[in-house]
């Protein structure tokens, strides 16, 4: 039994290391190399087989409870399904043209295989978000030819077409819409076996959590958990001063609910102004001016604003190219009377792949800021004129070159001269007529856009969302509360004292207030964007902040140390969401993300990450109190208790994601770097559940050290993959 146990766990650690190396190889040498040498190799398959067989023997011979036994058998069933898929499934692509039936599919290794029927394309279309050019869905209408029978089928994103065990998913299309490319998957046995494993895994997880004689319920009843600890906080505030000409605040704000085409979405001009201001200087306001005053300042007082040092430059290389030491520069600083655009040479070298540009990202970001400021000044970025032409609603700026010439003359004049007239009123300081013209402009938008126009309630919600810009303050306060309470908690625990009850209540109440604020904030974002806010990095960070506070509020009554953990995680995730690289913008969903499975997948995974973050901070606290054996033991029990739901949620989240992938692109596991590292994280933390098989995890200090170090795998999974390794999850 000892030998079998060693084989199982050594095999798992070796597998974990292999997977980590594979993701690096994929980044350096490409996906094909990683697949050839690792994922699709017989050695990799043999290693998985060795782990599965040895684990099965060990599980069957050891005296496990029924719930644990079923959990491990579920994992084995999933591995069997994966093996069947690897050995017998067929995967490839098929290109379909209109009026040209074909049954030939091309596999990844360039070989071909035949379908038992043939397909042709009847029609291909792209559905767009109303009034935008942003794709909402890609739809292929198929003709299926089977002997003398002909029938129709349809494939779209997240909607497969299945026939005779073959599954077809949308993959690509020709620019002229004359052909479509579908992925083909034939896996009649592997999917069923894997899905049965997923279902059994979910049931076993629920059983393990509610079993009154199970480990989790025993930990909850532990006498060691009685007792507690707490917190304190501080506030900050900011202010500033001014100089270039701007519109009066009330006039600028009156323009805030003008609708503009921004990020392929009909949003308010206020949202565009907010994103524009933040893009330039990293904040939502500038020198006491609102974002609306900033953007309208660029529109109507360009001569003032082009000399205003509003553009933030972080890159030393860019500052050197601009011949300045200042971090804040003006638009005029980018132009030299003798040399022209000072970043032109660096941008050309970047395009050519010249390695002499050491800070490529910094140069690109600076160029982007210059371009967007120029586009606002010239008006090309201000697409506020809806025009319905031949049944299609399109949005134009005053300087658009593609405005149809055969539209109604009055409409043509309004689009081309409207802002000029408004500019004349601004020059005259005729604010009364300015207000009247702005109202007339809104009427034009409502009349022209009709039913495609966002509702008044949605526009109001968007303005509320933009005004609730207190996430930075909440993030800073949360971090301070978390840090101060952490040290306070550690100090009183070391002395064996009890926390101050009133302080606990006050801080708990503040946590409730922050939680309610984020609930409203995320709710508004959901309503405005039209989808659950889980589609990108900033949104998932906001979600994790909300979840951290929710878990804190649920656990703090029994485990007081959860208060600083919740505030710390919430504050850190809010700060990450607000970083320049993850600047939130409300955009339409990518077609592949329009699935209810996305919501479940992301929510469950983020809950798991939040618990693992709690576990890490719990370990830090225990190591800080390592000379207090009683507190270390208490925190050990808390850690083991948090570990159980964290691992289960992570496992469920991963396998829900696998189902989503199977529905979206025909394969439930593609060894994408994010998938691989999520699996690595699951294996790493699952090890710590095996306290009997691996006695080292029964030692509190070792366990806490492990939890602190293991959190690195979470960081790599969430951030490292997105920013370093890439893959299909890079949009997240």
Image (spheres, rainbow, N blue to C red):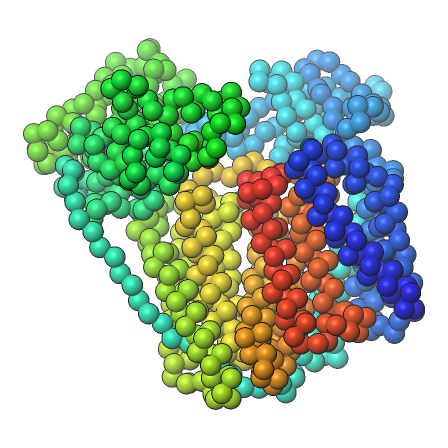
Q: Is residue 170 left or right of residue 335?
A: right
What residue is rendered at 26% in x and 61% in y? 237
Q: Is residue 217 left or right of residue 6?
A: left
Where, by quadrant of the figure, is residue 84 drawn?
top right
Q: Is residue 599 above or below residue 618?
A: above
Where, by quadrant of the figure, is residue 306 drawn?
top left
Name the foreground residue: 372 vs 518: 372
* Image mark count: 0
What residue is rendered at 72% in x and 72% in y? 697
Quarter of the image with the C terminus is top right
Residue 715 can be seen in this image = yes
Q: Position of residue 416 (x, y in %)?
A: 25, 18
Where, by quadrant of the figure, is residue 396 drawn?
top left
Q: Position of residue 575 (x, y in %)?
A: 42, 55
Name the foreground residue: 62 vs 398: 62
Q: Position of residue 220 (x, y in %)?
A: 64, 79
Residue 162 can be seen in this image = no
Name the foreground residue: 730 vs 260: 730
Q: Position of residue 587 (x, y in %)?
A: 45, 39
What residue is rendered at 89% in x and 71% in y? 62
Seen as rendered, the residue at the extreme top is 406
Q: Is residue 642 above or below residue 220?
A: above
Q: Is residue 213 above or below residue 438?
A: below
Quarter of the image with the N terminus is bottom right
What residue is rendered at 56% in x and 36% in y? 591
């Amino acid at each position: 039994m000892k030998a079998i146990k060693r084989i199982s766990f050594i095999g798992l650690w070796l597998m974990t290391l292999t997977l980590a190396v594979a993701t690096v190889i994929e980044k350096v040498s490409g996906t094909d190399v990683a697949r050839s040498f690792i994922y699709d190799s017989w050695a990799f398959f043999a290693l998985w087989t060795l782990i599965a067989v040895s684990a099965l023997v060990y599980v069957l011979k050891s005296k496990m409870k029924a719930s644990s036994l079923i959990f491990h058998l579920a994992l084995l069933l999933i591995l069997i399904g994966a093996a069947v898929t690897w050995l017998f499934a067929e995967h490839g692509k098929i290109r379909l043209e209109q009026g040209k039936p074909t049954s030939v599919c091309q596999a990844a290794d360039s070989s071909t295989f035949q379908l038992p029927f043939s397909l042709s394309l009847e029609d291909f279309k792209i559905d767009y978000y109303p009034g935008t050019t942003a794709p909402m869905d890609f739809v292929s209408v198929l003709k299926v030819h089977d002997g003398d029978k002909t029938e129709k089928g349809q494939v779209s994103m997240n909607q497969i077409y299945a026939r005779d065990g073959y599954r077809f998913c949308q993959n690509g299309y020709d620019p002229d819409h004359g052909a479509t490319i579908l992925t083909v998957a034939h896996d009649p046995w592997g999917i069923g076996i894997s899905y049965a494993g997923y279902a059994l895994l979910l049931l076993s997880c629920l059983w393990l959590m509610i079993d009154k004689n199970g480990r989790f319920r025993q930990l909850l009843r532990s006498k060691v958990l009685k007792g507690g600890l707490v917190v304190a906080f501080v506030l900050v505030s900011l202010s500033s001063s001014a100089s270039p000409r701007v519109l009066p605040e009330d006039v600028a704000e009156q323009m805030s609910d003008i609708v503009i085409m921004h990020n392929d979405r009909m949003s308010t001009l206020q949202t565009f102004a907010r994103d524009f201001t933040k893009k330039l200087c990293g904040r939502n306001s500038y020198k006491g001016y609102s974002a609306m005053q900033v953007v309208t300042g660029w529109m109507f007082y360009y001569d003032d604003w082009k000399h205003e040092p509003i553009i933030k430059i972080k890159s030393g290389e860019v500052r050197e190219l601009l011949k300045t030491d200042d971090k804040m520069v003006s638009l005029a600083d980018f132009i030299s009377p003798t040399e022209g655009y000072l970043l032109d040479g660096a941008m050309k070298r970047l395009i050519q792949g010249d390695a002499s540009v050491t800070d490529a990202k910094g140069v690109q970001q600076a160029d982007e800021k210059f371009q967007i400021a120029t586009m606002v000044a010239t008006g090309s970025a201000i697409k506020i004129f809806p025009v319905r032409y031949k049944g299609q609603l399109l949005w134009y700026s005053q300087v658009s070159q593609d405005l149809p010439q055969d539209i109604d003359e009055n409409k043509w004049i309004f689009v081309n001269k409207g802002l000029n007239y408004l500019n004349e009123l601004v020059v005259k300081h005729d604010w009364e007529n300015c207000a009247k013209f702005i109202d007339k402009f809104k009427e034009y938008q409502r009349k022209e856009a009709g039913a495609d126009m966002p509702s008044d309630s949605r526009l109001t919600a968007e303005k509320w969302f933009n005004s609730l810009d207190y996430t930075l303050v909440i993030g800073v306060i949360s971090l301070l509360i978390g840090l101060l309470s952490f040290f306070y908690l550690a100090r009183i625990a070391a002395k064996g004292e009890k926390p101050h009850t009133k302080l606990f209540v006050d801080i708990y109440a503040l946590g409730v207030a922050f939680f309610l604020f984020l609930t409203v904030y995320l709710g508004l974002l959901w309503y405005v964007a039209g989808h659950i806010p889980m589609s990108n990095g900033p949104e998932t960070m906001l979600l994790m902040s909300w979840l951290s506070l929710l878990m804190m509020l649920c656990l703090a009554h029994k485990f007081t140390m959860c208060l600083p953990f919740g505030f710390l995680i919430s504050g850190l995730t809010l700060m990450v969401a607000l970083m320049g690289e993850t600047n939130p913008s409300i955009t339409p969903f990518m077609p592949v993300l329009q699935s209810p499975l996305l919501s479940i997948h992301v929510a469950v995974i983020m809950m798991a990450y939040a618990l693992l973050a709690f576990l890490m901070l719990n370990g830090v606290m225990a190591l800080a109190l390592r000379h207090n054996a009683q507190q270390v033991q208490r925190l050990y029990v808390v850690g083991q208790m948090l570990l159980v739901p964290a691992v289960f949620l992570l496992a469920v989240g991963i396998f829900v994601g696998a189902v989503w992938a199977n529905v979206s692109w025909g394969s439930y596991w593609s060894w994408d770097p994010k998938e691989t590292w999520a699996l690595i994280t699951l294996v790493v933390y699952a090890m710590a559940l095996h306290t009997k098989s691996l006695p080292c995890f029964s030692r509190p200090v070792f366990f806490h050290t492990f939890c602190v170090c293991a959190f690195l795998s979470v960081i790599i999974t969430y951030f490292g993959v997105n920013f370093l390794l890439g893959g299909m999850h890079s949009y997240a």
